Image (cartoon, rainbow, N blue to C red):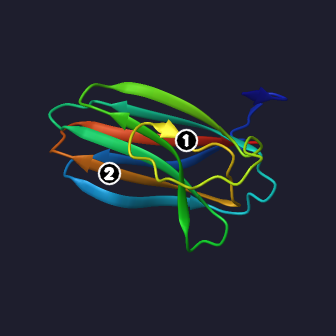
Amino acid sequence: MAIGGTTNTGGFKLINSLPITAALTDAVQRTITCLDGMTAVTVVASMVGGTDGTAILAKVQTSLDGITWYDIAQLVFANTAATFYANVSGLLVKAPTAYVPLAAAGVNDGFLGSLLRGIVTSTGTYSGTTLSLLASVR
């Protein structure tokens, strides 16, 4: 987005971007802090390449204290290049709701802390594969 002739990327936060080769298990990527008052987040995950491997899970988590982390979005890739997105709102749940970690692609709406981070899990051996996970916070 261009504002006043300059490029503005401040509203779109990079959570992680990395080459995927060997298997990863819950590999924590970048943590974004100081998101107090966040009411929604849109996440976009893109896998380029995607040859050979079995599955890549790109997970977005939130935390209230930086110690305990909760799944809010999970995007799942096979071995084909693709882009997936999800929107998570912090304003939806109005009654007590049991937290359930995401076991498949999906979102846990209604719960956003002041921290976000990306987690990557992959199975199989990939070649020429890169994963990017971006978040736009409102």
Q: Please, what secondary structure does the residue beneath circle 2 have?
A: strand
Which residue is rendered at x = 15% and y = 44% of the image?
A: 125
Which residue is rendered at x = 75% and y = 27% of the image?
A: 2
Q: Nearer the viewer, mark 2 or mark 1?
A: 2
Instruction: From the viewer's side, name the closer residue of 105 and 57.
Output: 105
Does residue 76 appear left or right of residue 49 in this picture?
Answer: right
- Per the image, the residue denoted by label 1 is 134
Q: Residue 82: x percent and y percent? A: 38, 25
Instruction: From the viewer's side, name the closer residue of 106 and 20.
Output: 106
Instruction: From the viewer's side, name the closer residue of 33 and 93.
Output: 93
Does residue 67 appear left or right of residue 65 in this picture?
Answer: left
Q: Which labelled disc corresponds to residue 25?
A: none
- Per the image, the residue denoted by label 2 is 121
Which residue is rendered at x = 74% and y = 49% of the image?
A: 95
Q: Is residue 46 above or below residue 61?
A: above
Q: Residue 31: x percent and y percent? A: 56, 61
Instruction: From the viewer's side, name the closer residue of 13 and 94.
Output: 94
Neighbor class of circle 2 (other Cα within 10 Å; few <14, some 14-19, many 20+) is some
Q: Please, what secondary structure does the residue beneath circle 1 have?
A: strand
Tell me which amino acid carries mark 2: Thr
Does residue 105 appear left or right of residue 78 in this picture?
Answer: right
Q: Residue 30: x percent and y percent? A: 51, 59
Tell me which amino acid carries mark 1: Leu
Does residue 72 appear left or right of residue 81 in this picture?
Answer: right
Quadrant in the picture for the C terminus: top right
Mark 2–mark 1 Cα distance, whole angstroms, equals 16 Å
